[in-house]
Amino acid sequence: MIVLTDDQNFADSSVGRTHKWRSGFPELLSENMKFLAGKLINKKVYHTTTDEFPSWNYLVAVNHAADSQFEILKHAVNEKHGLGDKIICLAGSGKNFKGYRNRSWISLPGNLHFCALLKPNQAVLNFHVGFTILSAISVIETLDDIPGFEGKALIKWVNDILINNDKISGVLTQTQTIGENVSSAIIGIGLNITQTPRLVPDIFNRKATSLNDHISDKTLYNLAFILNRLQFHLNKNYTLLLHGKYHYLLNIYRQKSAILLKKIEIYSDPHEGEAKKLHEGVVAAIGENLELILENNDQPVVRGKVVF
């Protein structure tokens, strides 16, 4: 894997190993990758290679991102159709990070700010929710890999990861298609590791949390551990999705649901104005495309925000 960075120490600490670095771009790096790296890195560029993540081709690690890496990837895909496959983008912190429906995501040093670009170039079963599912369960499986922490994290519909009903992570995905083939998929993941963002509590999110709030032994995990396990699970679940194992992944998502068989309320999710309650009831099932089946409700719920 080729690693590009503006900060060798940050990149080494993210991967968990010290490397020999060279200034500038690698000699054989494609023009499209130079274009992307130039958008992501606003300072002097350093490069190296590593065998730490054998299933990925590139890692672009930036200590402080001047803009949302997710948005940069979106625009780069639109401008440069020949971008490489299996690209990881990592930021120590940054500006203008966004979550679901363009909500602000607070970035703090020591937490994980991760994006990935995938180029399936094939038909993918239920791709419109499949990449959200594989991203969410990859975060769950990463947290389950921390000794003594297995089973603590659950998924709040559709894309938030909770511990004790407090938000520790969120995932964001976007796909593009050409005909029946998925030409690209972008995954964004934020995970609070060492710092807990201060949020204004509302009916949807009681408060945020981080791993440091729950695990006293900090030797069990760090950014390098989390990144290593996350890239492994993402690649594994991505491979399953490409091989038609959507329903296998969907069943894991259901098993890790924080709301299945629970009584909930569902509110509208307007960009502006006050949210209004739309439904309430016990979640009897999660459907084929993540729609919620409520007891005593004939119509599946396909949008809205959940309140326990």
Image: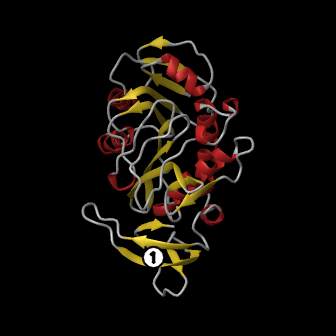
In the rendered image, the vertical position of residue 283 relative to residue 112, given as above or below: below
Residue 228: horizontal and vertical position, in percent?
62, 35
Q: Confirm whether residue 55 shows in the render.
A: no
Query: In the image, 48: left or right of 275?
Result: right
Kind of residue indicated by mark 1 = Val
| Residue shown at 49% from the left, 86% from the top | 297
| Residue shown at 52% from the left, 87% from the top | 296
Query: In the image, 99: left or right of 223?
Result: left
Query: In the image, 48: left or right of 108?
Result: right
In the rendered image, the vertical position of residue 47 relative to residue 276, given as above or below: above
Q: Confirm whether residue 202 shows in the render.
A: yes
Residue 145: horizontal and vertical position, in percent?
70, 43
| Residue shown at 32% from the left, 35% from the top | 67
Residue found at the far left of this picture: 272
| Residue shown at 31% from the left, 45% from the top | 78
Viewer-proximal residue among 102 and 258: 258
- Local secondary structure at mark 1: loop
Q: Which residue is mark 1?
A: 301
